[in-house]
Image: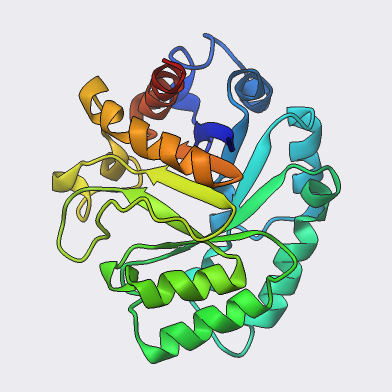
């Protein structure tokens, strides 16, 4: 039976204070409280800014080393790929992660590629080049274009021991369909919500404004248990962070999986 990790995509949301976080919790104390509630965290701030070793050591200190951390790759590696300087970016990024690795709390690095990253030769070659630079760290790739959902991709990831991000998202053209395929010892499941109306016209809050009901969550239970029977680690992250809905659904998933 694999190890189960459940957490949310990000934690530094002041609007969660008074809901998930106790009233009047200082922003500097959010992570400490989060660490008492969940055993894993998907760190999103590293997508917007290249992390530093000081920042990552601070994550170790503030969590007490109790939380497994998935770190989202810096956006210039996924959304602004350039063949001439990805190696230097990867080197800087990996150096920043060293405190997490030394303290055994680096779950993986999540490379979230946009829908515009097509299953075409230039993109495949770039992905292969990136993965070659990251053979010394655990990697999961999230592909938001359904073209990548094929056995050739899955087999190539298995050969490289790279995880495939299982996604739940709105049923829209060209977005991936929910498929519980995993390609490494780490099975990674990301729930974005199903806000079809706001997916393309919303911002980073309204796009993920969605609360899964109990019936919807129940449909995930057997597939997750199947993953637990075949993978060493199953990590589940709720990205429907508007109104602290991610924390509500994460706690409910924990209850359903124990039933």
Q: Is residue 243 left or right of residue 185?
A: left
Q: Position of residue 190 (x, y in %)?
A: 41, 45
The quarter of the picture where the C terminus appears is top left
Of residues 226 and 192, the one nearer the viewer is 226
Query: Looking at the image, can residue 76 be seen?
Result: no
Is the N terminus in the top left, top right, bottom left or bottom right quadrant? Answer: top right
Residue that protrudes farthest toward the right in the picture = 102
Q: How many callouts does the rendering have?
A: 0
- Please state the horizontal and vertical placement of residue 36, each as a whole percent of the image: 65, 18
Q: Work out whether 154 lies above or below 33.
A: below
- 182 is higher (above) or lower (below) than 229: below
Instruction: Determine whether 206 is above or below 91 in the image.
Output: above
| Residue shown at 50% from the left, 61% from the top | 183
**Would you identify the image quadrant in which residue 72 lies?**
bottom right
Q: Is residue 204 left or right of residue 41?
A: left
Q: Position of residue 41 (x, y in %)?
A: 58, 37
Which residue corresponds to the image point at 60% horizontal and 72% vertical from the top-left? 160
Residue 112: in sight, yes or no? Answer: yes
The x and y percentages for residue 144 are: 33, 63
Figure colour scheme: rainbow
Residue at horizontal 27 percent and vertical 45 percent from the top: 207
The quadrant where residue 77 appears: bottom right
In the rendered view, does 91 fall on the left or right side of 171? Answer: right
Q: Foreground: 240 or 85?
A: 240
Judged from this view, the residue extending furthest toward the top is 23
Q: Is residue 69 above or below residue 177?
A: above
Between 4 and 226, the one nearer to me in the picture: 226
């Amino acid at each position: 039976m694999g190890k189960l990790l459940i957490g949310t995509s990000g934690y530094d949301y002041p609007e969660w204070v008074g809901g998930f976080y106790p009233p009047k919790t200082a922003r500097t104390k959010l992570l400490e409280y989060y660490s008492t509630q969940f055993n894993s965290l998907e760190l999103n701030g590293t997508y917007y800014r290249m992390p530093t070793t000081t920042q990552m050591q601070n994550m170790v200190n503030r969590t007490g080393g109790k939380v497994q951390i998935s770190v989202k790759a810096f956006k210039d590696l996924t959304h602004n790929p350039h063949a001439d300087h990805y190696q230097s970016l990867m080197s800087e990024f990996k150096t920043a992660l060293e405190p997490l690795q030394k303290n055994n709390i680096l779950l993986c690095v999540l490379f979230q590629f946009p829908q515009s990253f097509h299953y075409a030769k230039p993109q495949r070659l770039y992905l292969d080049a990136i993965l070659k630079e990251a053979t010394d760290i655990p990697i999961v790739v999230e592909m938001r274009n359904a073209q990548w959902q094929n056995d050739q991709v899955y087999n190539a990831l298995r050969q490289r021991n790279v995880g495939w991000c299982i996604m739940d998202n709105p049923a829209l053209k060209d977005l991936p369909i929910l498929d519980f395929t995993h390609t490494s010892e780490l099975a990674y499941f990301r729930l974005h919500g199903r806000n079809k109306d706001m997916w393309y016209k919303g911002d980073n809050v309204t796009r993920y404004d969605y609360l899964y009901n109990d019936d919807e969550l129940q449909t995930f239970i057997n597939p997750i248990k199947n993953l637990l029977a075949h993978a060493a680690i199953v990590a589940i992250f709720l990205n429907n962070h508007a109104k602290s809905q991610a924390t509500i659904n994460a706690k409910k998933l924990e209850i359903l999986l124990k039933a």
